Amino acid sequence: MQETHVALTAKMTGRPVISATGLFTPPESITNEELVASFNAFVDRHNAAHPDAEPLAYSSVEFIEKASGIKARHVMSKAPILDPEIMCPRLPERANDEISVMAEIGVAAAKQALERAGRRPEDVDAVLCAASNMQRAYPAMAIEIQQALGIEGFGFDMNVACSSATFGIQTAADYVRAGNARSVLVVSPEITSGHLNWRDRDSHFIFGDVATAVLVEDAAIAPAQHWEILGTKLKTVFSNNIRNNFGFLNRAHPESAGSADKLFVQEGRKVFKEVVPMVAQMIIDEAGRLGIDPASLRRLWLHQANAGMNRLIAQRVLGHEASEDESPTVLDTYGNTSSAGSIIAFHQHNEELAAGDTGLICSFGAGYSAGTVFVRKVG
């Protein structure tokens, strides 16, 4: 028994780091001007066809930017979304022997992360597909991505809505700490244009499509320049204020299949009021546990959902209104990309930081769910 204990203790010595990240951005983008023109054409058609009903209100560029800070979003299927008769993406169904759309964009992001780390697929032990929606129930998207990349080991899917990527990073870090893996890919393909109600004025502007990848590894094999994971914290609190009721059981109730709540719905004001203090306090508390002064954080890579939420969270954490350098945004050009948002911000805005700088990757969203990943630059 003593030998077994010693062996297990020796095994649990991994020190997790982020070796590299990858990003796939769809080539097509929809500006607010294009989106508003499409939405208002739909409103004209609807109001003309329903003269006795309360008329739908127009959207506007000014309304969208004031409500969210979003100016554009990348999508996988632009033309159908902007067609007032369709107003949703149209992605042709692929045969079972073809790579799926989500796996394809996930693989693209993963390949970039591997290349940036100087890593080969055979060096990776596991793939976690962490996203807010999965293209199918099974086989797991992660296993398809694993197969496409030529990775041995294992993979599985996980969904914690907008916090999926940070929950995936902690899961990967735990595998490294326990010695169950030395290199783990966390891949987040987010085709959120598919769960958005493009006919809803209050939310038609929110989401965009993208895929990210984060390579979490043992520091012993990581490239010279990497990000040490100082600590992670996850939190969930049940709330109906962000909800999507789509699922396989909907087929048992075909009369409700077209209901609006089978797409993304939210009580935006309630979300703002409840999530901002919850996340800010979570960050402050976890920083204290790790012996980090929140005001000393060099950069905050926050979930890209709403500019106002990020501004208030950063202010509460840092003790002053954050500059663009302290809390960079990608929301204006990418929109809300669910779990991928904070990873895009980290991917695009970390190179110039110096060795020893500390920062925070943070996500929050439906559930409610929230995840923090405190990191320090090495090399």
Image (cartoon, helix red, strand yellow):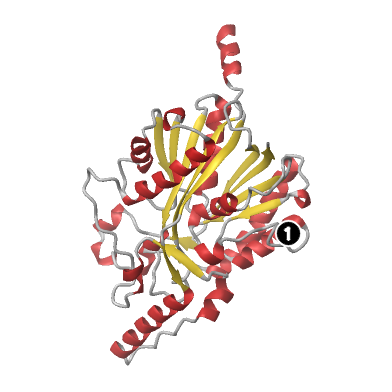
Is residue 36 visible in the rendered structure shown here? yes
Viewport quadrant of the N terminus: top right
Which image quadrant for residue 251? bottom left
Q: Of residues 214 and 22, which is closer to you in this image?
A: 22
Number of labels in the image equals: 1
Viewport quadrant of the C terminus: top right
Residue furthest to the bottom in view is: 51
Please determine whether, in this image, residue 201 is positioned above or below residue 250. below
Residue 77 relative to residue 277: left or right:
left
Residue in view at x 57 percent, y 65 percent? 306
Q: Of residues 336 and 98, which is closer to you in this image?
A: 98
Residue 238 relative to residue 135: left or right:
right
Which image quadrant for residue 98? top left
Residue 124, position as x, y percentages in the image: 46, 31
Please determine whether, in this image, residue 329 is positioned above or below residue 10. below
Residue 344, position as x, y percentages in the image: 54, 53
User: Mark 1 highlights which residue?
Assistant: 316
Please determine whether, in this image, residue 296 is positioned above or below residue 193. above
Label 1 crowd bin: few (<14), some (14–19), many (20+), radius 10 Å: many
Residue in view at x 51 percent, y 34 percent? 118
Residue 43, position as x, y percentages in the image: 37, 84
Quick one: SS at disc 1? helix
Residue 157, position as x, y percentages in the image: 41, 42
Three-letter amino acid code at disc 1?
Arg
Is residue 335 visible in the rendered structure shown here? no
